[in-house]
Amino acid sequence: MQIKTTLDKIGEAAHIFWQNIDGKIFAVEGDMGAGKTTFITALCHAKGVKSPVSSPTFSLINEYSYIENGVTHPIYHIDLYRVKDEQEAINAGIEDCLYSGNICFVEWPQKAPHLLPENTVHIYIEASGENTRLLKIDFHR
């Protein structure tokens, strides 16, 4: 699946994404500045997250929450950019998030590829212009 969007319509792309995607673990890849955190922010807001969404570059994991059917659910936003290896990711508690049954977004997943569950949905974000992004969603890796 592919979605082409502009940055000012990223929220609409997030709604389209949720209408077509059934998954919990999302590996979000793209070059620095491609819009990984911007798209994750839009996805969180489309789910109903009210708190600010920001890159967990230094904390490694940010937790947000949304309400669905009267129940509060967490969303984990993981950024592995500063992680040296998979063991460091394990020590940080990444596996607890990935196997919690909750939504997880993982930026820079290539830093710990063997930790990702088999059913991970991969999202590749490419800048195809100054304000245009191409989102490629891969269900089968």
Image (cartoon, grey):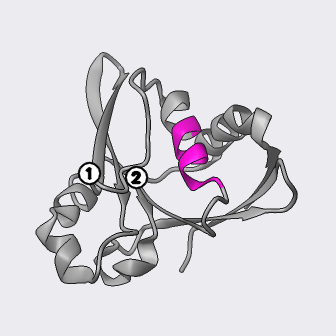
Instruction: Classify 10 Å Cα crowding around label 2: few (below 14), some (14-19), many (20 and above).
Output: some
Q: Residue at x 40, y 69 (%)?
A: 81
Q: Residue furthest right?
A: 129
Q: Is residue 34 left or right of residue 21?
A: right
Quick one: which residue is furthest to the top in this view?
70
Give 52 or 67, whichever is nearer the viewer.
52
* Place of residue 130 in the rendered image (x, y in percent of width and height, measured from the top left): 85, 53
Quadrant for the N terminus in the image: bottom right
Q: CA distance from mark 2 to mark 1?
A: 7 Å
Q: Are marks 2 and 1 in contact (CB under 8 Å)?
A: yes
Dividing the picture into quadrants, the one containing residue 6 is top right
**Looking at the image, which is closer to me, 10 or 99?**
10
Residue 94: x %, y % from top left: 22, 63
Q: Image check: 6 left or right of 136?
A: right
* Residue 24 image label: 2
Magenta residue check for 36: yes
Residue type, numbered disc 1: Gly
Name which residue type carries label 2: Lys
Give the main secondary structure of the magenta stretch. helix
Q: At x 48% / y 35%, what residue is drawn?
A: 44
In the depicted structure, whether residue 48 falls above or below residue 107: above
Question: Residue 82: percent from the left, percent from the top?
Answer: 34, 70
Query: Magenta stretch: residue 108 in it?
Result: no
Q: Nearer the viewer, residue 44 or 17?
A: 44
Q: Earlier in the sequence, mark 2 or mark 1?
A: 2
Magenta region, residue range: 35-42
Which numbered tag is attached to residue 101?
A: 1
The image quarter containing residue 30 is bottom right
Q: Which residue is at 27% across, 83% downward?
A: 85
User: At which x and y percent is residue 125?
Assistant: 67, 62
